Amino acid sequence: MVVSPVILMLAGAAIGAAVVAYIFKRAGGLWLLGLGLGAIAGAFGSALFLAPLDYCTFEAGRESLDRAFGLILAAAGTAIVVAPLGWLSGKLLRHESLIEGQQSQGAFRHWWIAIPLLAPTLTILLLFLYYPSLETLRLSTMLSRLGARREVFVCVDNFTRLVEDKTYFETVVRTMYMSFFIVVLSMGLSLLVATMAYLPIRGASIYRILLVWPYAMSPAVAGIIFLLMFNPSGGLINYLLGKWLGIKLGWLNDPKVAPWTIIMASVWKSMGFNILFYIAGLQNVPKDLIEAGAIDGAGVLRRFWHIVWPMLSPITFFLLVTNLTYAFFETYATIDYLTPGGGPLRSTTTMMYRVIQLGVQNNDMGKAAAESIVLFLTVIGITVVLFRTGGRQVTYGV
């Protein structure tokens, strides 16, 4: 099946026209204007990703997987362009403020004054964010070797081959469950420790500083500390287990145990950050609410669940997102020091570790770029789901 660019643009234009015209009609605007704007946006969106690739996914000889990937790119581009246009049109037509709660908007007397003020920020964003992002997108479509003089355009082969790679699917599953336990255990233990550290005891300030101290160390240092403790042959933990219980565990050379060693090291590393925020959050919980609950006969656990926990929900949601980012992106050094090469039988190889392994060690920049984009989109997708679901449960204020 050969799909021409014209057909894709017409399909995108039809979808965009229908969506935006419907929004215009519901908002009381000129639906014919919405029809035209939506058609232009849909046609542009369908070509947003495919035009730079020269519609290579629909070339003769391409497999059905490549064509399906091309259709996904066309649909994604259409949604990226049409959705903001529809939202903005609805807001403007209903005369709603784009920033809720803002009574007045500041404005420069001359529009050009904003340019020099924004120039430093825009320059930094262009050099260190947008340009590397575009370069990553370009590399993901290339057969590129680190140090090689030439690059070969391979369309979306670096992405489609991941679908057929069983080891990559195992890596994704492993990353998901390791990240899940890192986030849950880190936040749960941190809340427990912060609640205990918040109690009025002598020397509480020193105690709290010591609890936050591990956060000041890098993941590499955390890996070295846990290597000294959990080394299967000469580590402190196995020495104590052998002396007291007569057993020794393969903390770093057993494929079933090694991931849990990484999880424990990552949890310990991130707990200080979580404790710091939870202690700050506990200080903002109104004491009169807790006293009122105690007067009404509510026990400690009930007061915590119905009063303290809802008041901590903004901090909990913030920590959920930051810990998720840490679990996906910042565990490479810990893994590399504890289990070099990704562990026995790749048991500790995560998506981030695999990206660096491919790009730096194997010099395959094209595959590494493609897998980094998949990792980025995965984290973005999970974050969006969290904002759509958990964000609604957050309670701000009393």
Image (cartoon, rainbow, N blue to C red):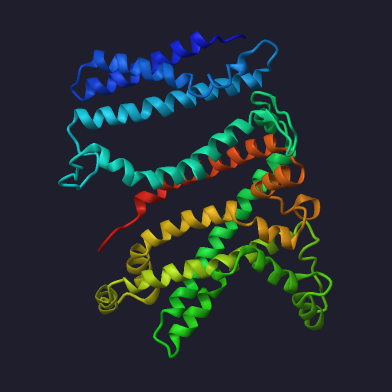
Q: Is residue 362 left or right of residue 316?
A: right
Furthest-left residue in view? 103
Residue 210 point in image, percent of width and height: 53, 80
Quadrant for the N terminus in the image: top right
Query: Which residue is depicted at the point 77% across and 57% down?
Result: 340
The residue closer to the viewer here, 334 or 303, is: 334
Residue 226 point in image, percent of width and height: 70, 70
In the rendered image, which quarter is residue 141 located in? top right
Q: Is residue 164 left or right of residue 199?
A: right
Location of residue 202 with respect to 109 vertically, above or below: below
Residue 384 point in image, percent of width and height: 44, 43
Location of residue 373 with respect to 276 vertically, above or below: above
Query: Which residue is depicted at the point 67% across and 61% down?
Result: 334
User: Is residue 47 at least partly visible in the picture?
Assistant: yes
Residue 52 point in image, percent of width and height: 55, 22
The residue closer to the viewer here, 319 or 287, is: 319
Query: Which residue is depicted at the point 25% across and 13% down?
Result: 32
The residue closer to the viewer here, 296 or 365, is: 365
Quadrant for the C terminus in the image: bottom left
User: Is residue 385 at least partly visible in the picture?
Assistant: no
The residue closer to the viewer here, 348 or 150, is: 150
Furthest-bottom residue in view? 202
In the rendered image, which quarter is residue 219 located in? bottom right
Q: Is residue 393 left or right of residue 341?
A: left
Q: Is residue 33 left or right of residue 247?
A: left
Query: Which residue is depicted at the point 37% across and 72% down?
Result: 282
Number of marks in the rendered image: 0
